[in-house]
Image (cartoon, rainbow, N blue to C red):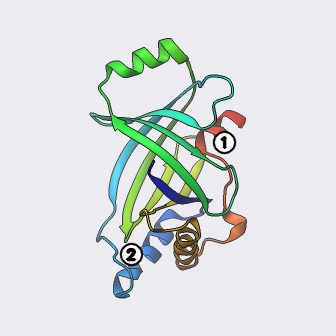
Amino acid sequence: MPRNVEIKARVEDLEVVIQRILALRSNATYDVRTEPSIIEQEDLFFNLPTGKCGKLKLRKMGRLQELIYYDREESSGPKLSSYNKCEVNEDVEKVLKNALGTWGVVKKERKLIMVGQTRVHFDSVDGLGDFVELEVVLNDSQTVEDGQSIAKDLMSHMGVEEKDLISVSYVNMLVNK
């Protein structure tokens, strides 16, 4: 199962944080892709059977739809997330809604910048505000600690502090709002 180390943090000014990441282009240590790609996303979360951990969501990005199951700890620091995903067609939504029911929807505009093996997401989430999310994609030989080190390094470059970190997912924040 693929793994990554994630952090999510609330930010006051997305553009300032984006510029801090783009400034890393001048440092040969970092492989920063040039400009952010903009993605409109809607995530629909499905109920899971009692006792099953994790979350199951259908992510819609224009014509592309992905079914994603993931499991991660609810903590504020860099944490391990294991996931599976696959592309699906539009019929899957109807089947899963009928079979499982839904419990939440998250709509966001996401700007993505790749920094080496890390997906840096700059998210404007409807009803919540602005956030940055790091997903350090681990290869088979890397430990969780390796990913945490990379995440902490990028956090320091962005000016993200421990007090800014969020321990729960966007959908949990919306449901509890």
Picture coordinates of residue 52, whole percent (x, y): 63, 30
Label 1, label 2: how far apart the Cα atoms are: 29 Å
Q: In the displayed structure, does residue 2 sit left or right of residue 8?
A: left
User: Image point 28% across, 71% down: which residue?
Assistant: 34
Image height of 97 relative to 16, above or below: above
Give the residue number, with chain letter if any, for mark 2. Answer: 22
User: Image point 42% across, 51% down: which residue?
Assistant: 110
Image height of 4 relative to 173, above or below: below
Mark 1 and mark 2 residues within 8 Å of each other at the beta carbon: no
Picture coordinates of residue 118, whole percent (x, y): 43, 65
N-terminal of the two: label 1 or label 2?
Answer: 2
Closer-to-camera residue (46/125): 46
Q: Which amino acid does the dot numbered 1 rest on?
A: Met
Quadrant of the image occupied by residue 78: bottom right
Q: Which amino acid does the dot numbered 2 rest on?
A: Leu
Under circle 2, the secondary element is helix
Closer-to-camera residue (115/160): 115
User: Image point 58% across, 74% down: which residue?
Assistant: 152
Under circle 1, the secondary element is helix
Closer-to-camera residue (40/68): 68
Residue extending furthest toward the front: 141
Picture coordinates of residue 137, whole percent (x, y): 44, 61
Q: Quadrant of the C terminus?
A: top right
Give the residue number, with chain letter if any, for mark 1. Answer: 173
Quadrant of the image occupied by residue 67: top left
